[in-house]
Amino acid sequence: MKPFIVRTIKAETLKLKHSPVWLAFFALPPISAFFGTINYTANQGILKSEWYSLWSQHTLFLCYLFMPALIGTYCSYLWRLEHMRNNWNAFLTAPVSLPSLYLGKLFQAILMSVSCNAWVFILYFACGKLCGLDNNLPPGIVEWFLCGILGSITICCVQLTVSMFIRSFAIPIGIGLAGGLGGMMFTSKGAGLYYPYSLYSMGMRANNPQMELETGTFIAGCAVYIALFSVLSVVGLHRHEQ
């Protein structure tokens, strides 16, 4: 017999088959990359750090606006079927554990996050080459990618919890967008490492690629929020079951 988590992942994959929601993740990052590249090329007299300057422009809108809203959209879509008619009953009576049901959705959110972040970095490299930059990519780019994924997974966990409790499709998206904007405020106040929606932008070094990140505190913050909202989601499933 296949492990429960494998079965739930396959079930969630079938639900998402032919879903149009993936189009947003291929369409919106190029928009952010386009405007970031245009802004970089138009201000090269000021932005003289080449790859670093280009990255600061690429992440300006991506980390605070596009990505939190995209994650909010995807997580809301993951719970959309359960919120329709009496599908909660069918969902909760599946022959798997409640944590496995949650992990099936979380896996899909993580897969989206990794894919979208990989697409962002591909666009960054391509735009850099179009701008005539050399092959010497910033040495910390792998760390940006890994920390960015961890930060985006944190937002996924928050948004999955929000979308599970709120039946509306649009409201969780608005919460994601507001959370991203709030992340800008917390980061500017020096408290970004303690606010879940700031962790993605901090990990990606948004608008400040040469920033020194307290890696241990960053990882601990992500781990706490991932664990906290995962537990809240499983507890919420227990409440729906009763």
Image (spheres, helix red, strand yellow):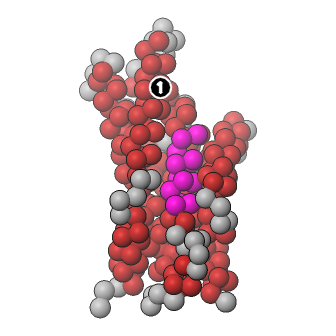
Taking depth in this image into account, of 60 and 167 the one nearest to the observer is: 167
- Where residue 154 appears, as percent x and y from the top left, is 55, 58
Which residue does the numbered mark 1 point to in the structure image? 36
Q: Which residue is located at x 32 percent, y 32 percent? A: 125
The quadrant holding residue 191 is top right
Q: Is residue 66 magenta?
A: yes
Can residue 1 be seen here? The reply is yes
Amino acid at the residue labelled 1: Gly
Q: Which residue is located at x 57 percent, y 71 percent? A: 84
- Where residue 176 appears, as percent x and y from the top left, is 62, 51
Q: Which residue is located at x 34 percent, y 25 percent? A: 128
Q: Is residue 142 left or right of residue 100?
A: left
Name above or below for residue 215 compared with residue 3: above
Name above or below for residue 2 compared with residue 27: below
The magenta-colored residue range is: 65-77
Taking depth in this image into account, of 142 and 213 the one nearest to the observer is: 142
